């Protein structure tokens, strides 16, 4: 007896040469993320009691990011033929970027001050002693994309990645 658990496996096909793989990063590629990092990880820290309770509106926002992530399917499709490598951020930015690096045979440097975070997470990092940028980099369940692409494609990527509300 216990809570209901549902596991789903999806199978599909992809056209030849249309897959965004972890193993195709190139030397000199820029590293991109598709949106804010850390919201889901902070929500989990609130649930575990590691971060003090904040106002209800903020909690709801963070919990929604944890429990109802919005996968970046449209952006992923738009990056085919542009990005050299990609994966989703399910195990934390550091771990998932490391998967790209290992698969491609390259290293990476993360500039922590350039990681996009929501205003809420940025302020919590400043206000909360036991919440550090390292927690944001290693937290998971953001389901944003981390991908690499040549620097000369910056304008093209920016035009294809605008959020549409």
Image (cartoon, grey):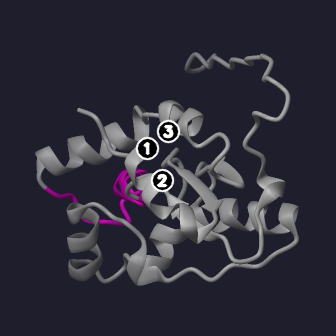
Kindly indicate the quadrant of the structure image that contains residue 8. top right
> Which quadrant would the N terminus be assigned to in this image?
top right
Picture residue at 21% right of the left edge, 62% below the top: 120
Front residue of 85/6: it is 85
Residue 164 image-quadrant placement: top left
Judge from the rendering whether residue 49 lies leftward or rightward of residue 99; answer left or right: left
Q: Is residue 17 above or below residue 14?
A: below
Q: Earlier in the sequence, mark 2 or mark 3?
A: 3
Cβ atoms under marks 1 and 3 closer than 8 Å: yes
Above/below status of 17 relative to 142: above
* Residue 132 appearing in the image: no
Residue placed at 45% from the left, 68% from the top? 136
Residue placed under numbered mark 3 in the picture: 75
Give the number of the disc on residue 157.
Answer: 2
Residue 7 visible to the viewer: yes
Residue hosting label 1: 160
* Separation (CA) of disc 1 from disc 3: 7 Å
**Residue 35 at x, y percent in the picture:** 40, 53
Q: Which x, y percent locates residue 2?
A: 59, 20
Query: Vertically, is 99 above or below 15?
Result: below
Asked if marks 2 and 3 touch (Cβ < 8 Å), the reply is no
- Per the model, the C-alpha gap separating discs 2 and 1 is 5 Å
Element at label 1: helix
The residue at 13%/46% (across/down) is 56
């Amino acid at each position: 007896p216990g809570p209901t658990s549902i596991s789903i496996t999806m199978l599909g096909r992809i056209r030849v040469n249309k897959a965004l793989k972890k193993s195709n990063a190139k030397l000199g590629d820029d590293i991109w993320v598709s949106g804010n990092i850390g919201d889901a990880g902070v929500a989990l820290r609130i649930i575990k009691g590691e971060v003090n309770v904040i106002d209800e509106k903020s909690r709801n926002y963070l919990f929604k990011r944890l429990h109802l992530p919005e996968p970046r399917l449209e952006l992923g499709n738009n990056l085919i033929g542009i990005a050299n490598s990609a994966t989703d951020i399910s195990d934390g930015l550091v771990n998932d970027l490391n998967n790209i690096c290992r698969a491609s045979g390259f290293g990476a440097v993360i500039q922590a001050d350039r990681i996009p975070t929501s205003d809420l997470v940025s302020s919590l990092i400043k206000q909360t002693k036991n919440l550090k940028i390292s927690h944001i980099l290693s937290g998971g369940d953001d389901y944003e994309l981390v991908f690499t692409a040549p620097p000369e494609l910056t304008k093209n990527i920016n035009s294809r990645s605008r959020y549409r509300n």
